[in-house]
Image (cartoon, rainbow, N blue to C red):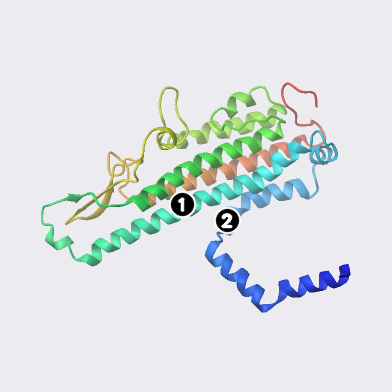
């Protein structure tokens, strides 16, 4: 078959009604999309590396020995980090959907008025536990993949978000490294459930290495349906008793960190373009 005929046949296949129907069904069944607002930080980064292409990107792409840093930075941000954040959002939505459905079961059953002063706890909520654990692991994965992408700007192969500020103390360009470190220091206080403090295990560590951490224990009473305890210590102290609200706040904090770090990277790196070639503290540019 001639190449022209092959191309015409391929275009005809991709444009046919049956194929459009298939892709539409697949997108609805297996696809997931971030909102326009959630895509904005990644669009900003894409514009920075393409309109026009910064000098250091041009040099990296033109040097086989340095092209890997281009892949780690660009594919890291636009591929790994963006998709891993979408994974966090997906599990957040799934957990909320299950929690809302469970509360609806309680309301529809009509048992509320029969409980009196009693409180009943327990029940099989494993699907909710599964989504919560997946959420926590995806959250940490997103942060560590982001650390690897950011470290690539400084031509360093590093993959720990928690230890990234230590690396950046010696990284150059100094202005870029200091600006990124400042954001990480400010934002990291929200990530203690996935980033361990010395001598302590985070919720993520407990899930990954030690125990089955539930989303919470179901409690029903005349006051309604609530989840108690679990990895987020729901209903204890100042914590909300609504898992969906807690995870929504955590996701907003993660997105805020991603958005601010990409904004700082773009703005500070742009000042260095054509002046300083990003490089590993221990390497020559």
For mark 2, give the secondary structure. helix
Say left or right for 9 vs 40. Answer: right
How far apart marks 1 and 2 lie (CA) works out to 19 Å
Q: Residue at x 25, y 52 (%)?
A: 123
In this view, 69 is above or below 174: below
Q: Quadrant of the N terminus?
A: bottom right
User: Quick check: 276 above or below 19?
Assistant: above
> Residue drawn 48% across and 47% down?
251
- Count up the numbered dots: 2
- Decide which of tag 1 and tag 2 comes sooner along the chain: 2
Place of residue 61 in the rendered image (x, y in percent of width and height, measured from the top left): 82, 41
Kindly state the secondary structure of the residue where label 1 is placed.
Answer: helix
Which of the image's four quarters has the C terminus? top right
Image quarter of residue 77: top right
- Indicate the position of residue 145 as horizontal and vertical percent values: 59, 39
Q: Nearer the viewer, residue 188 or 119?
A: 119
> Percent x, y for residue 14?
72, 71
**Image quarter for residue 237?**
top left
Is 234 placed left or right of 247 in the picture? Answer: left
Pointer 2: residues within 10 angstroms few (<14), some, or many (20+)? few
Q: Nearer the viewer, residue 114 or 188?
A: 114
Crowding at mark 1 (Cα within 10 Å: few <14, some 14-19, many 20+): many
Q: Which residue is mark 1?
A: 91
Q: Which residue is mark 2?
A: 37
Instruction: Give how far across and how far down residue 249 sits, in percent.
Output: 43, 47
Decide which of 4, 216 is in the foreground and name it. Answer: 4
Which residue reaches farthest bottom?
17
């Amino acid at each position: 078959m001639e190449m022209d005929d092959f191309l015409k046949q391929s275009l005809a296949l991709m444009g046919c009604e049956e194929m459009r129907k298939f892709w539409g069904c697949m997108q609805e069944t297996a696809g997931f999309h971030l909102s326009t607002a959630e895509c904005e930080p990644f669009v900003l980064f894409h514009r920075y590396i393409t309109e026009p292409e910064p000098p250091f990107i041009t040099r990296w792409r033109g040097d086989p020995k340095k092209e890997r840093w281009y892949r780690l930075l660009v594919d890291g941000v636009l591929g790994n980090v963006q998709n891993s954040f979408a994974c966090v959002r997906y599990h957040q939505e799934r957990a909320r959907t299950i929690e809302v459905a469970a509360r609806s079961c309680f309301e529809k059953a009509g048992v509320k008025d029969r409980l009196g002063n009693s409180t009943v706890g327990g029940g099989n909520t494993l699907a909710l536990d599964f989504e919560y654990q997946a959420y926590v692991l995806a959250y940490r994965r997103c942060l560590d993949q982001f650390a690897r992408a950011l470290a690539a700007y400084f031509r360093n192969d590093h993959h720990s978000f928690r230890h990234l500020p230590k690396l950046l103390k010696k990284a150059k360009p100094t202005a870029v490294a200091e600006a990124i470190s400042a954001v990480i220091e400010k934002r990291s206080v929200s990530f203690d459930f996935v980033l361990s403090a010395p001598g302590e295990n985070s919720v993520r560590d407990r899930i990954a290495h030690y125990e089955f951490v539930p989303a919470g224990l179901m409690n029903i009473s005349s006051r309604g349906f609530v989840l108690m305890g679990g990895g987020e210590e729901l209903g204890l102290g100042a914590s909300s008793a609504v898992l969906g609200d807690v995870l929504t706040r955590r996701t907003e904090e993660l997105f805020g960190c991603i958005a601010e770090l990409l904004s700082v990277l773009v703005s500070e790196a742009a000042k260095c373009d054509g002046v300083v070639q990003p490089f590993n503290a221990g390497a020559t540019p």
